[in-house]
């Protein structure tokens, strides 16, 4: 049976949190997750969503494309010291160093 295209956490991993280091602009540079050190090996992509107060103004979600957006996470490829590469989706959990690993694409 082929390996899954992605794994969703936390159900597949006992510790979905990662320690993340970022540059001056907040872009991820490296992380430690599941006991492995990873180096970001491509240009990270911002994951955004409409700001929370917009839903009160657009209750039917007819103008979501006009909503101001906030950064809630990142998607990036990272490479481990052993050469494995994965794509990570991470979300901000309120601590600038600790991030929630939402998905890992192997």
Image (cartoon, rainbow, N blue to C red):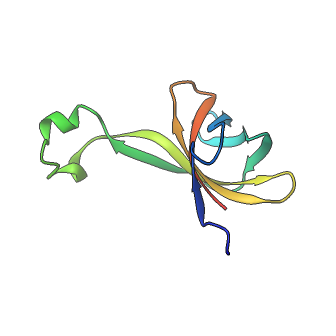
Q: Position of residue 88 (x, y in %)?
A: 61, 51
Q: Is residue 96 visible?
A: yes
On the picture, is 58 further left or further right than 34? left
Q: Is residue 44 visible?
A: no
* Furthest-top residue in this view: 95
Q: Position of residue 50 (x, y in %)?
A: 30, 42
Residue plotted at (50% across, 42% down):
73
Q: Position of residue 67 (x, y in %)?
A: 24, 44
Image quarter where the C terminus lies is bottom right
> Residue 4 is drawn in which quadrant?
bottom right
Residue plotted at (63% across, 28% down):
97
Q: Is 16 placed above or below 46 here? A: above
On the picture, is 31 further left or further right than 74? right
* Furthest-right residue in this view: 82
Q: Is 41 placed above or below 28 here? A: below
Camera-side residue of 82 and 47: 82
Camera-side residue of 36 and 57: 36
> Residue 98 is drawn in which quadrant?
top right
Q: Is 39 placed above or below 42 here? A: above
């Amino acid at each position: 049976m082929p390996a899954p295209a992605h794994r969703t956490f936390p159900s597949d991993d006992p510790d979905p949190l990662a320690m993340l280091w970022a540059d001056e602009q907040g872009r991820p540079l490296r992380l430690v997750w599941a006991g492995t050190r990873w180096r970001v090996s491509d240009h990270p992509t911002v994951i955004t969503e409409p700001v929370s107060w917009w839903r009160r103004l657009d209750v039917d979600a007819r103008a979501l494309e006009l909503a101001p957006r906030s950064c809630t996470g990142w998607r990036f490829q990272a490479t481990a010291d052993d050469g494995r590469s994965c794509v990570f989706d991470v979300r901000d959990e309120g601590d600038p160093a600790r991030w929630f690993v939402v998905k890992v694409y192997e």
